[in-house]
Image (cartoon, rainbow, N blue to C red):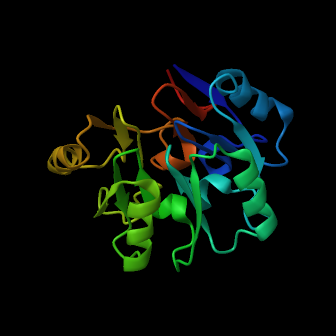
Amino acid sequence: MATRAQFENSNDIGVFSNLTNSYALVAIGGSENFYSVFEQELSDHIPVVHTSIAGCRFVGRVTVGNRRGLLVPNTCTDTELMHLRNSLPDSVVIQRVEERLSALGNCIVTNDHVALVHTDIDRETEDIISDVLGVEVFRQTIAGNALVGSYSKITNQGGLVHPRTSLEDLEELSSLLQIPLVAGTVNRGSDVIGAGLVVNDWCAFCGLDTTS
């Protein structure tokens, strides 16, 4: 079941939040309404953590994680890192990443088994993704876009990718990830799927403009 939400009149909720099977991150400073939507659906099952990264609210675009781990950019402050360590389950490994492409959420998309990454990501970062998140890593583009995290969203059950993804690409990605994929949009025709949607295996949140 997908729940519609808005962050201060913005439908790009994937910019301000991140959701996995073991925790959710939500940006500090939005209206209580935004948090309560998340907490209502999730708080019985997983922690909903209010945080900023590098003092900024776009937590969904600069972090990437799954049930095993969370990767944050090197601009994440010590205080924020400590807050995350104290708030997340003990089983979740948190790692700071020294990566030139620091908007990790735009450059990486992952579930609990496989990650797709930007073609220019550092070799070292690739190893960290593999170790911390416990996934197989593939360098890939989606509909010709290197920003795989912006143009797709995947779970262990399935995924949604950029509407202009060709059938051949769709089949190739689907067999790589071993999950069913569909091409589509969010928020009345937006192809930036990562920005308009946060999802895990049993719950989804999308922008208020998303059609039925």
In terms of depth relative to the viewer, which is nearer, 6 or 115?
115
* Image: 136 above or below 27: below
Horizontal side of 182 relative to 152 (left or right) equals left
Q: Give x and y (percent) for residue 8.
A: 79, 42
On the image, the x and y values in percent for residue 30 come to 82, 43
> Which residue: 67% across, 45% down?
88
Residue 31's x, y, as percent? Answer: 84, 37
- Residue 61 can be seen, yes or no: yes
- In the picture as drawn, the residue positioned furthest to the front comes out as 90
Residue found at x 69% / y 74%: 75
Residue 91 versus residue 24: which sits nearer the camera?
91
Asked whether, in this view, residue 94 is left or right of residue 117, the answer is right
Give whichever of 127, 39 is nearer the camera. 127
Vertical placement of residue 170 versus 39, above or below? below
What's the residue at 17%, 50% (across, down)?
A: 172
The residue lying at 56 percent from left, 66 percent from top is 103
In the image, residue 20 lies at what x, y percent?
A: 54, 40
